[in-house]
Amino acid sequence: MNIESYIREKAVSSRAAADALALMSTEEKNAQLLAMADALERAYDEIVAANAEDVEKARDAHLAPSLVDRLTLTKERFDAMVEGVRHVATLPDPVGAELSKCIRPSGIAIRKVRVPIGVIAVVFESRPNVFVDTAALCLKSGDAVILRGGKEAFKTNSALAKCVRASLSVPDAVEFIDITEHEAVSALVRCTGLVDLAIPRGGERLVRAMCEAALVPVLKHYKGVCHVYVDDKADFGMALSILDNAKTQRPGVCNAAECLLVNESIAPMFMPMVKAWADDKGVILHGPAKAGDGSVDWEHEFLALEMNVGTVANCAEAVSHINRYGSHHSDCIVTSDSAAASHFLKSVDSAAVYHNVSTRFTDGSEFGMGAEIGISTDKLHARGPMGLEELTTYKYEVTGDGVIRR
């Protein structure tokens, strides 16, 4: 098989599907989503059987229990996945929304309106629900999507693709890359003129590989090195509660805290409380060390019950440390000092910045988007959780009555 030709054929089909989707009304797109949900329910036995094969193969290969868990499609997860599709159908359609309008002295009328991006390529790992979530979001935003999942979920994704594509009036609106060679991803992100945007959903290794190969724009975050800074004016009980939630609720996700910064003036009182909390919750603490100490890998993403601990002289030093060593994802200050909070919120260069709130809230559903396709730490087009609006761009519609420029 010529992989490059195979991928290009998929991209050409997706481009034609994108043109058709762009003409669909909100009602037509919602009907497609509901048909997709119904088809998934009817294919439950087939999809779960395919998933069982993937899970058995993963266990035989001695993959990490956490990966096997993400791969497993339980009845509860399946039902939530289907309900998610129906929920997307209830969300406002961003396409066609008027962002601004004006009439210029020349007589031209200008409207700035949301439109679909076009063709989006999404490469993801492990979790099969990402296939359906992404397909639903892209369909609602009027975008055709090309999906390529990890080899560990190949049979599950194949069954999902068969079901989803059969339910659509424009099947190529959801394309599936049914080969596992790494060259397929490289070819996909080099389809200039056909693929408008690529989104990796996986670990740092996948993200960097896609970015290095890409000739099309890539929206991504490399990792989530998120911080909790406890200021000298912090309520200790609140600080421990936020720290506990940010670190232990789901330690393996990108918005979990990976570094605790403590104002050095309160460290003698607060750190024994942190140590007791860590012992109780099984959290391994690396430090405390002076922030910026070269012996500590401050940029490490643990994705486990481990974290770095540093001390800083003040809020300004905390901001400086976060901007240097953080991943520009999600960072929090715990303080009752409004001036310190304001400085932190304005100065920390991250997609989401929090005052007295856990970093775990960086999530499309928690932000009221209904669902998300991923989280971006880029600064152009989209930043933070990406929902339906972030899957659109805009164009200017200019009208007049024979107006010419003089």
Image: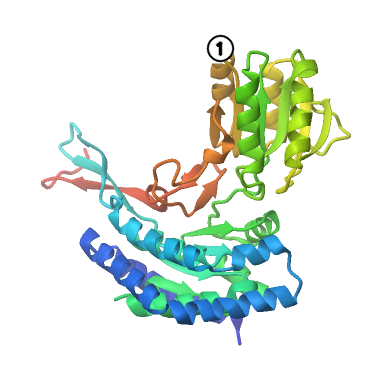
Q: Position of residue 352 (x, y in %)?
A: 54, 35
Furthest residue to the front?
Answer: 280
Within the image, what quadrant is residue 86 found in? bottom left
Rendered-image quadrant of the C terminus: top left
Q: Position of residue 73 (x, y in %)?
A: 54, 68
Query: In terms of depth relative to the viewer, which is nearer, 202 or 324?
Result: 202
Q: Is residue 135 in sight in this rendering?
A: no
Residue 49's place in the image compared with 34, above or below, is below
Q: Is residue 261 left or right of residue 200?
A: right
Q: Position of residue 396 (x, y in %)?
A: 28, 46
Mark 1: amino acid? Ala
Furthest residue to the bottom?
Answer: 1
The residue identified by callout 1 is 339
Q: Is residue 100 in sight in this rendering?
A: yes
Query: In terms of depth relative to the viewer, which is nearer, 398 or 71?
Result: 71
At x 35%, y 76%, the residue is 39
Q: Position of residue 403 (x, y in %)?
A: 15, 44
Query: In terms of depth relative to the viewer, which is nearer, 13 or 309?
Result: 309
Within the image, what quadrant is residue 104 found in? top left
Q: Is residue 175 left or right of residue 102?
A: right
